[in-house]
């Protein structure tokens, strides 16, 4: 499975926004945005004028990085969102939130997108009682996501749950921490997605 193996804190600095890619570190003073809130590289602190194209491109790149996707994967989600009834940009965000690794992260079983993806790939996550190792598996409403019984005492899982207790879970997700399981109560509405994303710019980018 292709994935980005580079330093993720540089990605946050490039976008000028906390993308929460580093788990608990993102909530401390060690966060790269807190220490160096400018793009990486020799010219990171110089003034830059952005064209309309670059603004749309940066928005697409930001969302790709939030969900840990590469270009071909992201383009396929956009094509699927276009074919669905409704507003393309909102369809895109809902599809990304339905990914198994994203739901594992939202439930608080992992502290970062990379950790959630690894839990799924290594067989620690079950959907409706069956092990699923595909991070891009799309969940439907009322499907149950749980941690494999043999994996419930793993330190990474317990640490993630402890951190999640302080953050809470989204309103469209139900969680039973004692049983290490949760489910989608409903698909998220656009108002429920609080990350500063302008999906209209992404639609304009692909429609140019």
Image (cartoon, rainbow, N blue to C red):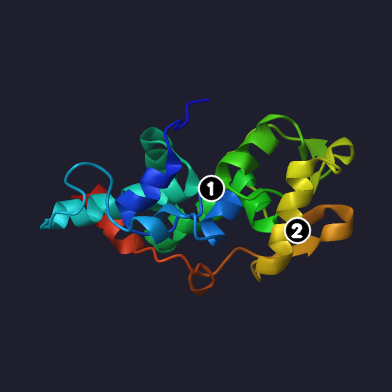
Residue found at x 72% / y 35%:
132
Image vertical order of residue 199 relative to residue 6, above or below: below
Viewer-proximal residue, 194 or 93? Answer: 194
Residue 83 visible in the current orientation: no
For marks 1 and 2, the one nearer the N-term is 1
Q: Secondary structure at mark 1?
A: loop
Residue found at x 28% / y 55%:
38
Residue found at x 69% / y 68%:
166
User: Alpha-carbon neighbours of circle 2 within 10 Å: few (<14), some, or many (≥20)?
Assistant: some
Q: Secondary structure at mark 2?
A: helix
On the image, the x and y values in percent for residue 128 come to 81, 45
User: Alpha-carbon neighbours of circle 1 within 10 Å: few (<14), some, or many (≥20)?
Assistant: many
Residue 182 visible in the current orientation: yes
Residue bearing the label numbered 1: 22
On the image, the x and y values in percent for residue 17 come to 38, 59
- Left/right placement of residue 10 relative to residue 148 reads left
Image vertical order of residue 191 relative to residue 154, above or below: below
On the image, the x and y values in percent for residue 189 come to 54, 70
Image vertical order of residue 61 relative to residue 170, above or below: above
- Left/right placement of residue 55 relative to residue 95 reads left
Give the residue at the far top of this rendering.
Answer: 1
On the image, the x and y values in percent for residue 178 come to 89, 58
Residue found at x 40% / y 66%:
196
Image vertical order of residue 208 relative to residue 198, above or below: above
Q: On the image, which quarter does residue 80 sit in?
A: top left
Residue bearing the label numbered 2: 162
Q: How far apart are the alpha carbons under marks 1 and 2?
A: 16 Å
Viewer-proximal residue, 33 or 8? Answer: 33
- Left/right placement of residue 54 relative to residue 8 reads left
């Amino acid at each position: 499975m292709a994935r980005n193996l580079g330093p993720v804190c540089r990605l946050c600095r490039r976008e000028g926004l906390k993308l929460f890619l580093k788990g608990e570190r993102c909530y401390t003073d060690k966060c790269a945005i807190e220490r160096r809130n400018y793009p990486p590289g020799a010219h990171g602190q110089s003034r830059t004028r952005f064209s309309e194209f670059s603004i749309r491109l940066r928005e697409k790149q930001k969302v790709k990085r939030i969900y840990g996707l590469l270009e071909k994967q992201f383009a396929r989600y956009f094509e699927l969102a276009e074919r669905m009834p409704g507003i393309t940009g909102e369809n895109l965000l809902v599809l990304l939130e339905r990914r198994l690794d994203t739901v594992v992260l939202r439930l608080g079983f992992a502290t970062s997108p990379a950790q959630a993806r690894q839990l799924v790939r290594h067989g620690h996550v079950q959907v409706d009682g069956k092990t699923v190792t595909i991070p891009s598996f799309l969940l439907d409403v009322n499907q149950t996501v749980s941690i494999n019984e043999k994996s419930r005492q793993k330190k990474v899982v317990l640490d993630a749950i402890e951190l999640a207790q302080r953050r809470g879970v989204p309103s469209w997700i139900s969680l039973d921490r004692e049983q290490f399981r949760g489910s989608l109560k409903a698909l998220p509405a656009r108002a429920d997605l609080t990350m500063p994303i302008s999906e209209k710019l992404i639609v304009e980018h692909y429609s140019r």
